Image (tube, helix red, strand yellow):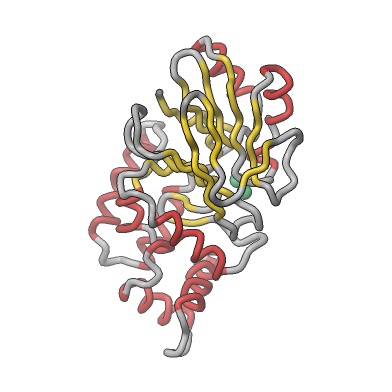
């Protein structure tokens, strides 16, 4: 089973898992990059996994399903191209002998889900987390609250440390610029940023990232660390009584305004 990101639009990734004969794709916002990959490798599309309803994650679903007969799995509480097998927290999706566990991760959208694949013959665990956790950052709160996003990121952070984090966008460098402003003293962050800059300079994706790395460099997974709290308190002039959700909300707002 191999895992590759197929670039789409300006900075989206459509993730593809394939075993040499069949493929699974995640969040196909466009159909052509998937058709190209299927043709290039001689693959049949078995399933499409959808993490949330945004068009840059679903725009290619109907064309791919109509052409291949692939099964579509998506969030139970969002409007996605039909027919779609609806999934929520605790459900599983079984495709090509793989068993994906569904985790509810609201915040970016109200019904956003993640697909978690435990370790197996394919190697380390994999999580497809859409626009919730990015390398060095997190998604914007279009439909959910800061409290929801914080608890969704907590749920993802509880996955095994060697989990490969497969995000929906190549936002890593701009996220890390912000992360460095929040934690200028984080030496692992500085090292990771240099490594990601080198990858981008070679035209390579920075993803998948590893969950262990994210917990050490991503300010949105570190909002309870003293270094991040102090930076947020100083930036947003929060009162000393601010709770962890207030701090997280101010951190997200800081990122929204950051250039
Ligand atoms: Zn989105
Ligand atoms: Fe997106």
Image quadrant assignment for residue 30: top right
Which residue is depicted at the point 75% across and 46% down?
A: 79
Which residue is depicted at the point 51% across and 46% down?
A: 129
Taking 71 as reference, is 200 above or below it?
Answer: below
The foreground one among 209 and 102 is 102
How many numbered dots are placed on residues in this image?
A: 0
Residue 44 in picture, x, y percent from top left: 57, 15
Which residue is depicted at the point 69% across and 24% down?
A: 65
Taking 200 as reference, is 191 above or below it?
Answer: below
Locate residue 41 relative to residue 59 in the image: left or right.
left
Taking 181 as reference, is 189 above or below it?
Answer: above
Which residue is depicted at the point 41% across and 44% down?
A: 165
Residue 61 in picture, x, y percent from top left: 69, 31
Residue 112 in picture, x, y percent from top left: 61, 51
The foreground one among 203 and 74 is 74
In the rendered image, the quadrant that contains the N terminus is: top left
Judged from this view, the residue extending furthest toward the top is 42
Taking 40 as reference, is 136 above or below it?
Answer: below
The foreground one among 251 and 71 is 71
Residue 201 in picture, x, y percent from top left: 37, 36
């Amino acid at each position: 089973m191999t895992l590759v990101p197929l670039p789409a639009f300006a900075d989206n990734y459509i993730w593809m898992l394939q075993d040499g004969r069949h493929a699974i794709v995640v969040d196909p916002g466009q159909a052509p990059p998937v058709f190209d990959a299927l043709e290039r490798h001689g693959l049949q599309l078995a399933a499409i996994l959808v993490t949330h309803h945004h068009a840059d994650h679903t725009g290619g679903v109907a064309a791919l399903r109509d052409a291949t007969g692939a099964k579509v799995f998506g969030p139970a509480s969002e409007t996605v191209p039909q027919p779609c097998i609806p999934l929520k927290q605790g459900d599983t999706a079984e495709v090509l002998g793989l068993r994906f566990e569904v985790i509810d991760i609201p915040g970016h959208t109200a019904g956003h889900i993640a697909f978690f694949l435990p370790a197996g013959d394919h190697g380390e665990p994999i999580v497809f987390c859409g626009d919730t956790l990015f390398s060095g950052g997190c998604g914007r709160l279009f439909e959910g609250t800061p409290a929801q996003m914080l608890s969704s990121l907590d749920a993802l952070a509880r996955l095994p440390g060697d989990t490969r984090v497969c995000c929906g966008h190549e936002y890593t460098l701009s996220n890390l610029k912000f992360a460095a402003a929040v934690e200028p003293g984080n030496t692992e962050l500085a090292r990771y940023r240099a490594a990601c800059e080198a990858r981008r300079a070679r035209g390579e994706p920075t993803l998948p990232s590893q969950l262990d790395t994210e917990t050490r460099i991503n300010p949105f997974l570190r909002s309870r660390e003293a270094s991040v709290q102090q930076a947020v308190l100083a930036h947003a002039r929060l009162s000393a009584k601010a709770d962890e959700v207030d701090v997280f909300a101010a951190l997200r707002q800081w990122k929204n305004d950051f250039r």
